[in-house]
Image (tube, helix red, strand yellow):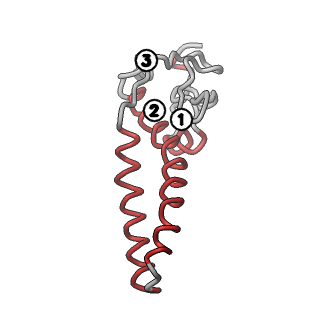
Amino acid sequence: MSAAEYPPASLLTIALHCRCPRCGKGPLFAGLLKVTPRCTHCGLDLAAEDAGDGPAVLVVFVLGAIVVAGALVVEALFSPPLWVHVVLWPPVTLGGAILLLRPLKAVLIAQQYRHRALGGGPATP
């Protein structure tokens, strides 16, 4: 199949389902964050994928804002002892980081593909 036969997949679909940026059907990851070398559905070569530190930086900014805002709200409303914050926020931060890293990495890979930085990009219209 040529690249012209693949309709563009939605970024939201790619992010939430962690699918191939070209076909939107093959899995993007072969582990927690390891990108599969080739799409099992369309054969897109993903070996050259390099999202770099982009997903981690986005997670730090987004999750950092959420956690700090949450801590401030909890402190303002309930004034709990310090140990409550020590027990509450590290698991929230760790869980949020794990949940956000895959979708954000998938979005950055899809953007690389769409802007022709990965595998030649989509076909020109």
Residues under numbered marks 1 and 3 in contact, where contact means CB atoms less than 8 Å apart: no
**Residue identifier under label 1:** 9
Cα–Cα gap, marks 1 and 2: 9 Å
Say which quarter of the image contains residue 42.
top right
Residues under numbered marks 1 and 2 in contact, where contact means CB atoms less than 8 Å apart: yes
**Residue identifier under label 2:** 110
What is the three-letter code of the residue carrying label 3? Ala
> Which of the marked residues, 1 or 2, is nearer the chain's N terminus?
1
**Residue identifier under label 3:** 48
What residue do we see at 42% from left, 57% from top? Answer: 63
What is the three-letter code of the residue carrying label 1? Ala
Q: Quadrant of the C terminus?
A: top left
Classed neighbour count for the residue bearing mark 3: other residues with Cα under 10 Å, few (<14), some (14–19), many (≥20): few
Q: Quadrant of the N terminus?
A: top right
Q: Secondary structure at mark 1?
A: loop
| Label 2 vs label 3, nearer the camera | 3
Classed neighbour count for the residue bearing mark 2: other residues with Cα under 10 Å, few (<14), some (14–19), many (≥20): many
In this image, 41 relative to 13: left or right? right
| Label 1 vs label 3, nearer the camera | 3
Instruction: In this rendered view, identify the residue nearer to me: 15 or 83.
Output: 83
